[in-house]
Image: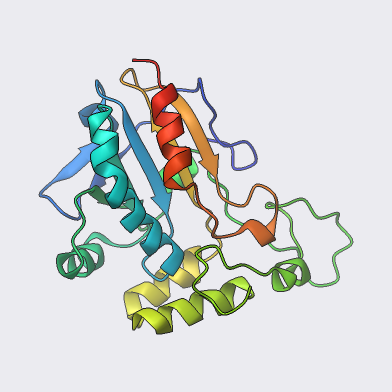
Amino acid sequence: MGDPLHPLQPGDPAPAFTLPAANREGSVSLADLRGRPFLIGLFRGLHCPFCRRQVTQLADIQPALRAEGIETVAVINTPVDRARMYFRYRPVPLLLLADPACGTHRAFGVPAVEFLPDGSTEPAQWPSRTRMADFEAARVNPTGELPERMQPMAANAALNAKDGFEPDETDSAIMASHATQLVGHFLIDGAGTIAWANIEARDGPSSLCYFPDAAQIMAAAGALER
C-alpha cells in the first residue's frame, strides 16, 4: 500500500489490484496486464471535467503508445454501472476500470487533500495539511478554455456547464466522498515495476487540474527500457 505522503516512485513494484471493467465484461487485475508495459491514469469521478478531458487526451495518444508496445488504462472513481452508462454514449478505446472507493489510488499512494480545521495553528503541509484559504486563493485554467484563471471549484462548475454535464446522484455522492482526491499517472513496465510517475499538484493548489501532456507521456514512453 502506498504512503499518501510518498506516492510510489520509479523502481517500486506496482501494487496488485482487481477492478471491474467499464467497457468490457468482467474484471481486470495487475496480473492480467503483466507482461506488457502499460500506462495507468488514476482519476477522480465523472464530476471532474478536467479528468474527462484527460481521458480523451489519453485516447488520442493511445495509437502512438500502442505503437511503442504500451497499453493504456484509465481508472475512474465512480461505480461501474455509472461509468458504463456514461462511456456507452462517449466511448473511448482505452481500457476503462471503475474504482468508486479510490482503493487503487491509495495503493499507489496518490494523495487526497486534507484541510486543517478553522483556527488551527498546525503548520500547513500540502497536500496532507492545507488551509482552506490557500485552496480558495488558487486560480487555474489548465486547458485554456476558461475566460480567465478561476478558483478550482468554480472552474469545475464552468466547464461542466460548458459541457452540458449535470452530475446525477451517484456523481454527487462520489464528489462528497472523494472530491479532494488527486490524480496520478504511472507507466508500468512489463515486469510490473513503475518506470515513471506523475502526481497532480505537487507544487500546491495552483497546479491542481494540470496533467501531463502528450509530449511528456510520449517522452516517458520513449525512455522505457524494453
Residue at image coords 35%, 36%: 39
Decide if residue 21 is on the left or right side of residue 55.
left
Residue at image coords 64%, 57%: 207
Decide if residue 57 is on the left or right side of residue 210.
left
* Residue 121 place in picture, x, y as percent: 89, 61
* Residue situated furthest left in the rendering: 25
**On screen, residue 31 above or below 156:** above
**Residue 4 is drawn in which quadrant?**
top right
* Residue 87 place in picture, x, y as percent: 21, 64
Decide if residue 199 is on the left or right side of residue 134.
left
* Residue situated furthest right in the rendering: 121
Residue at image coords 72%, 52%: 126
| Nearer-the-camera pick, 161 or 134 | 161
| Nearer-the-camera pick, 143 or 201 | 143
**On screen, residue 184 above or below 151:** above
Quarter of the picture containing the C terminus is top left
**Does any portion of residue 109 appear in the rendered image?**
no
Residue at image coords 71%, 73%: 136
* Residue 166 place in picture, x, y as percent: 35, 83
* Residue 148 place in picture, x, y as percent: 62, 77
**On screen, residue 26 above or below 186:** below
